[in-house]
Image (cartoon, rainbow, N blue to C red):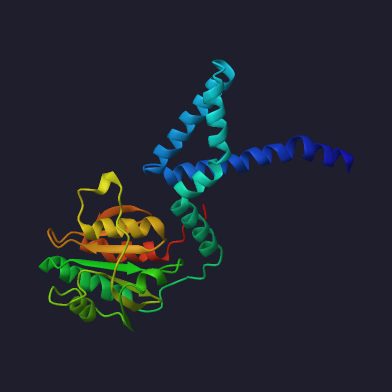
Amino acid sequence: MELVAHIWNVYISNILDILILAYIFYRILLVIKGTRTIQVVIGLIVLVAVTIIARDVLHLQTLSWIMGKFWLAAVVILAVVFQSEIRYALAKIGSKLFSIRTKIKSNFMSEIVEAATEMSKIRMGALIVLEKDMGLKNYTETGIRIDAKVTHELLLSIFNTKAPIHDGAVIIKDEKIEAAGCVLPISTEIEVKHLGTRHRAGIGLSALTDAIVLVVSEETGNISICVDGKIEKVSTENLLETLTNRYTQKANVL
């Protein structure tokens, strides 16, 4: 037993420690890759280099003192800078650990696809959110509560340009229309500045939650799906399959 304990303490525990940390850092890099967060990380790396050079190489006392005070407050600064990412990561971990979604119980997805296809033909703009494991109550409360069965006729009526709530988003929860005319967070990423408000809203919400957002362009009639802060164009022929797979797919915890 002593030999086993010695091997564990000296070798296995250290190797396991390194592997777990490497995996965590790898998943974090995948999350922040391509976002403005990576620029903040690069900035922090530069500040670490400045601190080391000023303290250990050039022996600049004043700069070293200032940087020392900065790192004392670094935890609070990082919490403020990365508050949305931290909130998203914690919510994602909790939602995935207790996720019970297994399959779609009704044909509501076909109704969404039928409505999106029709709106694409007549170039009627739409923004449809499918709630998954993370709750969207703070967004549904910005709209008008509907609590109705999903039908393509109802979706067409909501997004009709004469409807007072057509500019907002429809949020679908538990395969029912929870609310309409909802206000979503707009993505401020430079890469999507050229896109319209609906597309940036879809990207913005999907970056903060695990929701699936379907967007129909009013200008071109193109249909897009937003997931994890990314947007992809989808043809009407593949829409049902793609949307169903995205909705039932379980994401990684990290």
Identify the residue shown where x is 20% and y is 69%: 167
How far across and how far down the image is residue 208, in percent? 40, 57
Residue sitting nearer the eye, 147 or 150:
147
Identify the residue shown where x is 24% and y is 57%: 199
Task: Looking at this view, name the residue that lies furthest to the bottom.
Answer: 148
Q: Quadrant of the N terminus?
A: top right
| Residue 77 visible within the image | yes
Residue sitting nearer the eye, 97 or 60:
60
Determine the image quadrant of residue 32: top left
Query: Is residue 159 found left or right of 174 in the rendered image?
Result: left
Task: Looking at this view, name the residue that lies furthest to the top.
Answer: 58
220 is higher (above) or lower (below) than 39: below
Residue sitting nearer the eye, 86 or 170:
86
| Residue 107 visible within the image | no
Identify the residue shown where x is 51% and y is 52%: 254
Query: Is residue 185 found left or right of 38 in the rendered image?
Result: left
Residue sitting nearer the eye, 152 or 126:
126
Determine the image quadrant of residue 36: top left
Task: Looking at this view, name the residue that lies furthest to the right.
Answer: 2
How far across and how far down the image is residue 80, in percent? 47, 49
7 is higher (above) or lower (below) than 86: above
How far across and how far down the image is residue 160, in percent? 15, 75
How far across and how far down the image is residue 203, in percent? 31, 56
